[in-house]
Image (tube, rainbow, N blue to C red):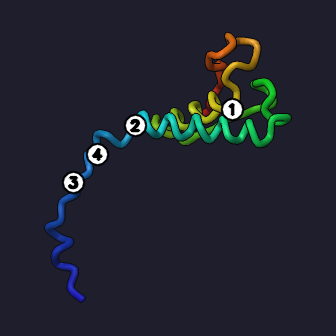
Amino acid sequence: RSFEWLRSWESTYDVTAVHDLVHAGLEEHFGIGERLRKRFPSLFDSYNFRTHRFQSSHMERAARSAAAMAHGLFHGTGPASVPGRHCAVHVET
């Protein structure tokens, strides 16, 4: 097989958007967190930064994904939260 065409191939992907996380991605990660909390309520009753640790790669969108999932797990709980609002969480990169 000949792969000569590969030498002249150009990607149509916008490499400047590599750090972006679209709103649908944020909602999906938030929803995953909500579903996990609903399935395992005793694990996620309230946020404690010493007990619940979130870590991501250094990429901005990975950190935003981790934060969205953590917010889904703990929204409306924890010492820094207001009922119905997100709980502040710490994500290490």
Q: How far is mark 4 from mark 1, CA to CA?
A: 31 Å
Q: Are marks 4 and 1 in contact (CB under 8 Å)?
A: no
Q: Quadrant of residue 83?
A: top right
Label 4 or label 3, whichever lies nearer to me, is 3
Q: Amino acid at mark 2?
A: Val
Q: Which mark is residue 15?
A: 4
The residue located at (49%, 35%) in the rendering is 26
Mark 2, residues whose alpha carbon is within 10 Å: few (<14), some, or many (≥20)? few
Horizontally, is 10 left or right of 27 in the view? Answer: left
- Whether residue 89 is visible to the viewer of this picture, yes or no, is yes
Find disc 3 in the rendering and name its residue: 12
Label 3 or label 2, whichever lies nearer to me, is 2
Q: How far is mark 1 from mark 3, CA to CA?
A: 36 Å
Q: Are marks 4 and 3 in contact (CB under 8 Å)?
A: no
Q: Earlier in the sequence, mark 2 or mark 1?
A: 2
Q: Which mark is residue 73?
A: 1
Relative to residue 85, is residue 29 depicted above or below? Answer: below
Q: Amino acid at mark 4?
A: Val
- Tag 3, which secondary structure? loop
Q: Horizontal and vertical percent for residue 90? A: 65, 25
Label 1 or label 3, whichever lies nearer to me, is 1
Nearest the camera: 4 or 26? 26
Q: Which mark is residue 22?
A: 2
Q: How far is mark 3 from mark 2, CA to CA?
A: 18 Å
Q: How far is mark 4 from mark 3, CA to CA?
A: 9 Å
Q: Horizontal and vertical percent for residue 20? A: 38, 36
- Tag 1, which secondary structure? helix
Q: Are marks 3 and 2 in contact (CB under 8 Å)?
A: no
Q: Amino acid at mark 3?
A: Thr
